Amino acid sequence: MQNSGSEKQNILIIGAGLCGSLLALRLGQRGYKVTVIEMRPDLRKTDISAGRSINLALSDRGIKAMNLVGIQDKIEPLCIPMNGRLLHDIEGNTTLAPYSGREHEYINSISRGMLNALLLDEAEKHDNVNIYFNRKCESVDFENTTAHFTEFDTKKEFIEDADIIIATDGAGSALRQSYYLGRKFLFSFSQDYLSHGYKELSILPGENGSYKTYKNALHIWGREAFMLIALPNLDGSFTVTLFLSYEEGDYNFNNLTTKERVLEFFTKYFKDALDLMPNLVEDFFANPTAPLGTVKCSPWHYKGNALLMGDSAHAIVPFYGQGMNASFEDVVEFDKVLDEGHEDWESIFKAYEKSRKQDTDAIADLAIDNFHEMKGHVNHPNFREKRSLEMAFEKTFPNEYSSKYSLVTFNEEVGYREAMLRGRAQDKAILNMLADGRISHSKNLSKEELGLILEKVKAETEAILANK
Amino acid sequence: MQNSGSEKQNILIIGAGLCGSLLALRLGQRGYKVTVIEMRPDLRKTDISAGRSINLALSDRGIKAMNLVGIQDKIEPLCIPMNGRLLHDIEGNTTLAPYSGREHEYINSISRGMLNALLLDEAEKHDNVNIYFNRKCESVDFENTTAHFTEFDTKKEFIEDADIIIATDGAGSALRQSYYLGRKFLFSFSQDYLSHGYKELSILPGENGSYKTYKNALHIWGREAFMLIALPNLDGSFTVTLFLSYEEGDYNFNNLTTKERVLEFFTKYFKDALDLMPNLVEDFFANPTAPLGTVKCSPWHYKGNALLMGDSAHAIVPFYGQGMNASFEDVVEFDKVLDEGHEDWESIFKAYEKSRKQDTDAIADLAIDNFHEMKGHVNHPNFREKRSLEMAFEKTFPNEYSSKYSLVTFNEEVGYREAMLRGRAQDKAILNMLADGRISHSKNLSKEELGLILEKVKAETEAILANK
């Protein structure tokens, strides 16, 4: 039973979202007998988006996973490159802040539904992969490696047996809840909610599927206490998301209860966005308000029987655009561990968690940081000066510098934890040195002058890293 | 119903441990109608210690609470002063490391059972306080302010109704579990276990209740990966606690399964302690191994209906000797908020949590830090040099310096958070300056020379605090 190399191993995957369907595809390619059971209907047949996470940002870590399973060519047509942040101030003026000084580095807006459908199609091409929908996992008996499901239509209950169970069932994972409630071992667990929630809105397409505002950017209306963002879709629309406190401040989700209040709020803070959203009020009251939570836990696995992967192990807030990318990278890292020739599933799960957890903890923390960066810091002069200096470094010395954002987003060979430590030290170095006048930035710097500044930043960064 | 000032208010307290019985006493003194329901038998009639947390360290924050309820005189005879850490090295040599350079600053070993019994006796003197035992809380309906109990003997279930419910039912709180499972609001929650567990052992009294080793200290056998500690009891015995990993290292709780292994382990690492414990093996296999966990959560309250207090809101690991003191301080802080004249319970609970949570978060983190300090740092030359310098500061300039330990333990007017921030900055300042030779310490320093070093430490501390 524990010979993990055997192709006769039955693997049960709970959840056919982005992570589960990619995992099923990869394990199918490796020859395992894979059963995937999903709570919701098949999204290829039913629209189940319901105003939540309609599109996502796909970047290098996620693309690496697409390469692993060989579908990068099928992904490309679904992608809309976003080269930077388009910052909208309260008067409606805009500034494009590139994500990188290297032109080939950008992120991609992609439809969750289309990407998930593609992954399901590809997984199902393998005879050894079977996917079932409309069956909700109620609990997992991780001692006996069985899971308890209820069929949505008939309410019929059944037990599924497997050699191993991998739960990719998201932030509300049934396996994780079974770990917590089972009290069979010491399960460290946290769920942390921000005081802010989010609501999806939309800018509808212009005539003939044209875009009503600039297509190739992630739009941000940062207002310190709250913000609005927008990502482009292939049909010319943008998915807009409002991040706002539930109860703090003059305007919050709890008190935006009338058409008049909502319009007043948008007129005051997001006038140029409101002009593009005649459908605002309708969307606002039709779409749900959802919470923003971070989940961490350990251990992810129980012996060689069960494993949490993706959001079920590490749900993060969306502000670094890394939730999907991190979950895809999970599959890449798990696949790498499968190649290491471990003797049994327990060793595999242990090795995977040992190398992976520090990185998913790091991206969770980085995502919280970026919430504050996007809401407010992007508007501050010292932050902007730091970014323009970093853009100049990346452009002029492309092999010698990567900003924190670049390390996280475009350097898939650097783990999240290393990216976090180095990136934070760089940020601190540059902000300190700008503040006390040891360096400064202007557009007129020669390459040599810029190079000297870069050396200073590098030295200060190393000093900060050594002092940790 | 919401008039919190009214003496007709019915308050249900779940749990009659240290925090619950103190709270009952204080609310009884204030005239509320208090019902306390406890899961376990009355500890005044039955021995229920079962080898767990037999004694505790009472220090200034806890003593402040005893003063609030006017029982400080009754507490004093129960206390054994511990003036410092008595460090035992592997050869059996000992060094006394004082807790403070000020002689009147020490901590007190006290019996949990005796203290709890005293608080129960004092609470029951009030006709408006009623305490019931052997009734387990199964869940709390915090919407309707009722709690569901089962009587231990008869298995009879009953519902208790109240105007407000305060849960002081410890780390495994029923109210907290109801918050978590109820999903009625966004409940942030974490439970984090150390890889180490603990087991209580004992050094029995010598002849005529004499002490077999030095009475007035907290004994520490720090061995980097694990440690043993001992606190004195009034009867001449010491309660000894082994902190050891469950599964890591050559010796761990999972593999110490035979008499021979246990003796081998103690002979190798704790020879001088073993000589005082002929009863070691018996204790080792009779007493349970218990986990070490930290619990944080928020919000603590649900509207004006229910509130978590003490370990149920913030269970911490025992390494700062602050668990009980923090819970007692909860009652002092809650009492202070009651004096502020809020209009309803919701405002009271909100104000209490707002001021209190940052402090209990801080002591939770400090307690984890101290685990590493006690296991290993206490043996390091640079740590010892720092401590000897701090002792000299506190002795020579008693009004100008308090170490982190003193801030946390002996400065009850400074909140835990402030103590943490300032204490950590001081530690960093001194260790950095010792490392790069900017300051040094020797016994021959004049008062003037010591004063100059103190000024440097203060300046560096302020610089570190400003740079945060």
Image (spheres, coloured by chain):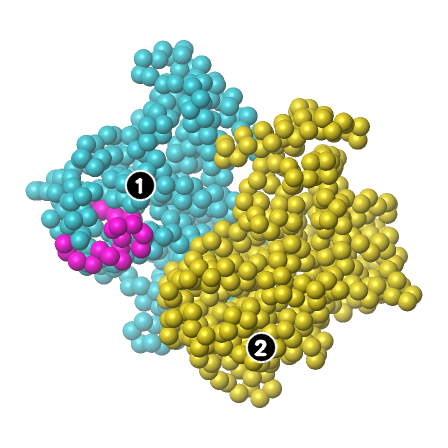
Chain colours: A yellow, B cyan
In this view, B97 is above or below B323: above
- The residue closer to the viewer here, B195 or B17, is B195
| Coordinates of residue A368 in the picture (x, y in percent) | 61, 50
Report how far apart the C-alphas of labels 2 and 1 lie in the structure.
53 Å
Taking A48 as reference, is A181 left or right? left
Residue at image location 34% in from the left, 72% down from the top: B151
Q: Nearer the viewer, mark 2 or mark 1?
A: 2
Q: Residue B128 in the image: x percent, y percent?
A: 40, 58
Identity of the residue drawn at 48% across and 84% down: A158
Say which of B142 and A118 sits in front: A118
Q: Residue at x 41, y 69 (%)?
A: A4
Say what amino acid the circle numbered 2 marks. Answer: His
Residue A325 image point, x, y percent: 62, 58
- By secondary structure, the bulk of the magenta-drawn segment is best described as loop
- Magenta range is B233-260
Q: Secondary structure at mark 2?
A: loop
